[in-house]
Image (cartoon, helix red, strand yellow):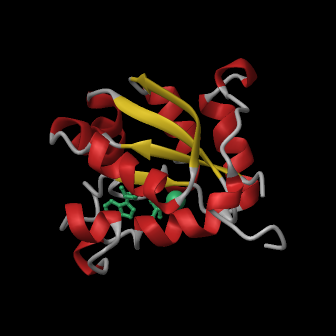
């Protein structure tokens, strides 16, 4: 039940005033915000976070974009947080993302797709550690009885 994942609300979303709309989708789904902060990514942090993409032709644009303006990093907690969050976010190419997903509703671009979400439990652990110190994450009570049956 205590699964956690990392979201990054990207510079395009902050510039377009979409932070509240995006965050509310995860709250309304029943997830808990375990941590939240604004930061501006360095080039080094971008290279670490997107290590799987540094050799791609689009990487220079991705790095420039992600480091150009502040972002909002969020740790989301709840049942199957990694998988469900990816479903709410939608596919990488926002042009093809279904309506109802964050990317489908707010973007028509692959490179300016408003949000990042960890893609596996292992990645989530690493990414949370990359962006948050332990004391920046909060363990507080929500009454889960309103969200799930006790046997879920
Ligand atoms: P994801 O964000 O859906 O997990 P990844 O493949 O991990 O997708 O790529 C990370 C980010 O790199 C994407 O969200 C997008 O901003 C950017 N990106 C991925 N593929 C492309 C591409 O083909 N062109 C431009 N940007 C891309
Ligand atoms: Mg990814």
Residue at (27% x, 71% y) in the render = 104
Percent x, y for residue 74? 51, 38
Between 30 and 71, the one nearer to me in the picture: 30
**Residue at position x 28%, y 38% in the image:** 11
Rendered location of residue 55, percent (x, y): 48, 54
Q: Quadrant of the N terminus?
A: bottom right
Q: Residue furthest top?
A: 135
Residue at image position (74%, 24%) is: 134
70 w.r.t. 61: above or below: above
Asked if residue 94 can be seen in this view, the reply is yes
Q: Is residue 43 above or below residue 151?
A: above
Question: What is the quadrant of residue 129 in the picture?
Answer: top right
Is any part of residue 55 visible from this angle?
no
Residue 127 at what x, y percent from top left? Answer: 64, 42
Q: Is residue 29 above or below residue 7?
A: below
- 53 and 126: which is toward the camera: 126
Number of labels in the image equals 0
In this rendering, would 60 be left or right of 1? left
Query: Going 59% across and 46% down the picture, which residue do you hit?
Result: 32
Q: Quadrant of residue 132?
A: top right
Between residues 20 and 132, which one lies in front from this camera angle?
20
| Image vertical order of residue 80 relative to residue 14, above or below | below
Q: Write down the quadrant of residue 78 in the picture.
A: bottom right
Check the picture and name the quadrant holding the C terminus: bottom right
Q: Position of residue 41 (x, y in %)?
A: 43, 27
């Amino acid at each position: 039940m205590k699964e956690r994942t990392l979201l990054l609300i990207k510079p395009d979303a902050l510039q377009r005033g979409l932070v509240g709309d995006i965050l509310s989708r995860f709250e309304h789904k029943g997830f808990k915000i375990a941590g939240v902060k604004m930061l501006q990514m360095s080039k080094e942090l971008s290279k670490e976070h997107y290590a799987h993409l540094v050799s791609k032709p689009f990487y220079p644009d991705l790095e420039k974009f992600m480091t150009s303006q502040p972002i909002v990093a969020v740790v989301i907690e709840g049942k199957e947080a990694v998988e469900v969050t990816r479903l709410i976010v939608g596919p990488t190419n926002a042009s093809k993302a279904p309506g109802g997903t964050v990317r489908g509703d707010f973007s028509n671009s692959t490179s300016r797709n408003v949000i990042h979400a960890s893609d596996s439990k292992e990645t989530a652990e690493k990414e949370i550690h990359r962006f948050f110190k332990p004391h920046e994450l909060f363990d507080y009570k929500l009454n889960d009885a309103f969200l799930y049956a006790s046997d879920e």
